[in-house]
Amino acid sequence: MSALQNLKTSSESKKHVKSLLVYIKSKSKEDLERFAKSCGTTSSNLLQIAYGGSVSAMLSKKINKESEGKISLSELRPDIFS
């Protein structure tokens, strides 16, 4: 498999994190900024994660904790927390 095929396969396998998308959309801009800060990231990064961007195990745990479990670890990182 060529490098281009590998890249396409890996990017196609990225899934939206629906619970994070719903959570983000339910927050005001100010509340989202506070949530992002409490997770140690930015609202822009949370949006990237929600649309399939990569997220570390450590940040996944922070997002899960700060959302009071509304965003599951297994949805954020199914490769680690399934």
Image: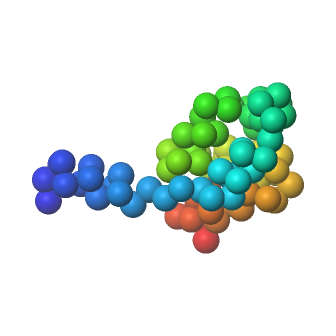
Q: Is residue 54 visible?
A: no
18 left or right of 39? left
Quadrant of image for the N terminus = bottom left
Q: What residue sits 69% from the left and 58% below the top?
A: 19
Give the residue at the far left of this rendering. Answer: 2
Q: Is residue 72 visible?
A: yes
Residue 61, above or below 69: above
Q: What residue sits 18% from the left and 48% below the top?
A: 4
55 left or right of 70? left
Image spot of residue 70 (x, y percent)? 79, 59
Q: In this rendered view, identify the residue nearer to me: 31 or 57.
A: 31
19 left or right of 50? right
Image spot of residue 23 (x, y percent)? 75, 50
Quadrant of image for the C terminus = bottom right
Q: In this rendered view, identify the residue nearer to me: 17 or 69.
A: 17
Give the residue at the far bottom of this rendering. Answer: 82
What's the colour scheme? Answer: rainbow
* Residue 9 position by quadrant: bottom left
Q: How many marks?
A: 0
Image spot of residue 43 (x, y percent)? 67, 32
Q: What residue sits 53% from the left and 48% below the top?
A: 51
